[in-house]
Image (spheres, grey):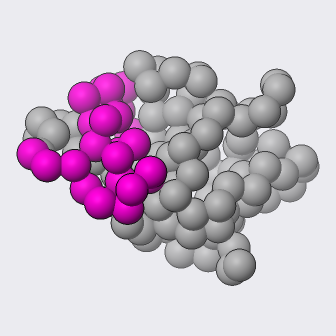
Amino acid sequence: MHKQRTTKWSAALAATAAVLVTGVAAAGPASADEPPLGQGEVAFWEEAAFGSEYVRYVDPGSECVNLPFSTRMIANMVGPIDVHAGPDCTGGTYHSPDRDLHQFPGTFRGLSFRVVSG
């Protein structure tokens, strides 16, 4: 699993949204420090805004992953993921299907996640 943490990503939003909606990458590359989200990747934002800090995981596997901060939003190109409100995949759960770009409902904040089958 590869993890990348940064505060920049707004330029890649259009490319990521295009892939999530159509399954086809948008033409033209994003800048070198703002890559689009590709198949096998998932990103979490600290706030429900793309300008906030985010962390991106490449091929996270099926083990529980504790996030470096509580999160309010997900872009998922990995497959079904359960996001948990507590550390170590405990607490309330938000289920994210594959190709999901979503703010978590209400006051839910994710602290850990796990890729699940089906």
x, y (%) of residue 37?
34, 51
Segment tinted magenta in the rendering: 3-28
Above or below 106: residue 16: below
Q: Dividing the image into 4 quarters, which one contains the C terminus?
A: bottom right
Which residue shows up at 25% across the image and 29% down it?
A: 11
Which residue shows up at 34% across the image and 46% down it?
A: 18
Q: How many marks?
A: 0
Q: Is residue 23 magenta?
A: yes
**Foreground of the two, 69 or 80:** 80
Whether residue 57 is visible: no
Identify the residue at the far front of this view. Answer: 22
Which residue shows up at 59% across the image and 24% down it?
A: 48
Above or below 33: residue 19: below
Above or below 75: residue 113: below
Q: Is residue 33 left or right of residue 75?
A: left
Q: Is residue 101 left or right of residue 109?
A: left
Whether residue 97 is visible: yes
Q: Is residue 24 left or right of residue 57?
A: left
Q: Is residue 74 left or right of residue 41?
A: right
Identify the residue at the far bottom of this view. Answer: 117
Q: Is residue 96 magenta?
A: no
